[in-house]
Amino acid sequence: MRKLLLLSSLMTIIISCSPKVYPVQSCVIVSEQNNTITLRATGFGKHKIESLDAAEKNALESILFRGIPGSQYNNPLISLREDQALQANPRYFKELFEKGRHKSFIISSVPVTNYSWTKYKKWTITADITVNIFALRKDLEQNGIIRKFGL
Amino acid sequence: MNMRKIIIIVLLIIVTISTAFSQETTPVVSVQTVQPKIMVIPYTKEGEDIRTILESDVNKRIVLTKIKEAFDSRGFTTVDFTAKLKSANDNNIFASGNQTDLKSQIIQMSGADVYVEAEDNVLLTPSGNSVKIIVTAYEISTGNSLANKVGESNKFYTDDIGKLASKAIESCATDFLNVIQEKFTDIVNNGRSIIINFGFDANSTYSMSSNVGTQELQLSDELELWMEEHAYKNNYHIQGTTDKQMIFDDVRIPLKDPNTGNNYNTNKFALEIFKFMRSLGLNISRDIKGNTIYITIK
């Protein structure tokens, strides 16, 4: 009984000391051309389609709120803080991300990995997503989310 | 005629009268912000003739066109440098000689608020040719740098330098415009920067240490207290004060009048200064050049 207790406490210590892995949805630049940018983004989801959709949203969110290092869009398209922007324009962002309007700014979405189980204990897929930045910026300007060029 | 018909007729009359005499609603016209004028010019070294350089070098013209194209794609019209140059030539405005002056004269006569200078550097090597472009945007009145970028075409086995120049400018144009836009947003939020130079007429009996106003404060103190109150968001910077001069090298003024919502400019701010100086019992003359106000106390 004593041995069993010792073994179980040892196991508990080992498990609690093992590194915790946090899921990361990566998003890096592949290429950029006139008014379009191709990003390699990952997405998590319960189905392949859901994962791909999450990857597309991840790409769009990176362009809008975080910027893409190493590209001409290293500054985010929206200079406001993400929570402020979402709070100020709830209807626009609800339509964009929840009602699938984000798809209208995506020119192509090509999976580059299989839909697979990861170390994050989630199903994921990575895809090359090409975004029409010109149209996205115009849309943001027309809806008053960002200011037009100038004063 | 039954009661129902009477009611309908009365209602119809009321509707007709109320429509006929109702006030016409005038649409609310939002005031359009006056946009800055931007001019794209080529970089020239000292002594270089800006006219011959631009006319003889197609690559420089390609660079300028590409930059203007980038502004156009963002819905912004630029002042055409070549057209200004031609009209200046036609009017014989410039005397050939000092070319640096020529550039400043064109900038001055164009009425531009911002100018973008583009320098291209062609690198011809056995391993391929490439072009590097340096683009810089300046605010003319204050000399503040708005954006700086270097674009590279990467190396290619081609003699088409124009194409390489296009690639170089494409590699940085969006980022360049985004940085300018950030500065414009800062201007919208924190006001436009102007310079105010207070000086004295040769025959003036006043100096910055003269006691003026009801509080009998020194003139320089009165000016600073006023500036503190009137600079947009209390944002001003004093370059220096001597007994004969006081320079505010960065005073922020709003783009729109906070009371009326109309466009606000340097002239209107100069008028405010004029009123304040009069309230102190001082007689002044004011000159405005671009975003600089020169106040001369008589």
Image (cartoon, coloured by chain):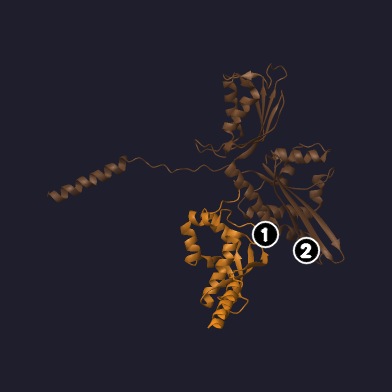
Chain colours: A orange, B brown
Query: Mark 2 = which residue?
Result: B154
Q: Is residue B14 above or below residue A132?
A: above
Residues B189 and A6: in front is A6
User: Are the residues flagged by discs 2 and 1 in contact, CB closer than 8 Å?
Assistant: no
Query: Mark 1 = which residue?
Result: A72
Residues B237 and B183: in front is B237
Q: Is residue B184 above or below residue A106?
A: above
At x 74%, y 59%, the residue is B168
Mark 2 Cα-neighbour bin, 10 Å: few <14, some 14–19, many ≥20: some
* Residue B258 visible in the picture: yes
Q: Quadrant of the C terminus of chain B?
A: top right
Q: x, y (%) of residue A61?
A: 57, 63
Q: Chain of mark 2?
A: B
Q: Determine whether the residue tagged by mark 1 lies in a helix, strand or loop.
A: loop
The amino acid type, in three-letter code, at marker 1 is Gln
Horizontal side, residue B93 vs residue A61: left or right? right
Mark 1 Cα-neighbour bin, 10 Å: few <14, some 14–19, many ≥20: some
The amino acid type, in three-letter code, at marker 2 is Asn
At x 23%, y 44%, the residue is B13
Q: x, y (%) of residue A73?
A: 65, 59
Q: x, y (%) of residue A38?
A: 64, 67
